[in-house]
Amino acid sequence: MVALDLTGQQFGELKVIARDGNIGNHAAWLCQCSCGNQTTVPSNKLKSGAIVSCGHLKRDVNHTGLRRGYQDKKKNGVATFLLDSKRKVRSDSSTGVTGVKVVKYRDGSIHYAADMTVKGKRHRIGTFSTIEEAAQARRAAVDALLNDLNN
């Protein structure tokens, strides 16, 4: 089977320069990235859109901590939409409340710790006897932060 010639085609940030052998059962293509780097990518990854750059886009996402488009939604550098109490709770949440987790002490007692992450830094709000107290304290801390950002 002859591979389809992808030379000159653009896939995301990658422009195909030349055929470069095979990777597994797929034709490999030498590509020039918009940032100047060159990389070899299998044809199936190019055509499916699984790879769209030399890796710099993923590095940029990891560096900012947020996907593209989120930067515009930030207020004074804070991703306020991530603090919204109406957001879906993570499926691995031990309490069912965002920003509240179970803390078990050596004496067997169970408490609930509230925290929030702002600009990549975790802020401890406190430890409480009930989930409701911890959730209320977190809501108050988020509200205070939002009020400060709006003023």
Image: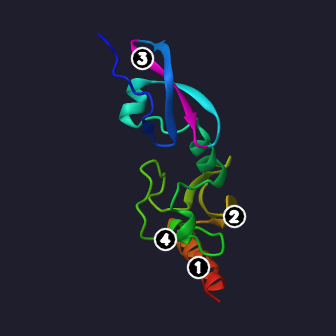
Instruction: Determine which residue is flagged by label 4.
Output: 84
Q: Image quadrant of residue 125?
A: bottom right
Residue reaching furthest to the top: 1
Answer with mark 1 or mark 3, whichever residue precedes in sequence: 3
User: How far apart, in angstroms, are the residues tagged by discs 4 and 1?
Assistant: 12 Å
* Amino acid type for the residue under numbered disc 3: Ala
Is residue 10 on the magenta stretch? no
Which residues fall within the magenta stretch? 25-34
Q: Are marks 2 and 3 in contact (CB under 8 Å)?
A: no
Instruction: Please give the residue where the numbered disc 1 appears in the rendered image.
Output: 140
Query: In the depicted view, which residue is nearer to us: 20 or 95?
Result: 20
Q: Is residue 49 left or right of residue 36?
A: left
Q: Nearer the viewer, mark 2 or mark 4?
A: 4
Give the side of residue 91 with respect to residue 99, left or right: left
Measured in 3D between alpha carbons, the distance from the residue under mark 2 to the one under mark 4, in whole angstroms, is 17 Å
Mark pair 1, 2: CA separation: 13 Å
In the image, what residue type sits under mark 2? Answer: Arg
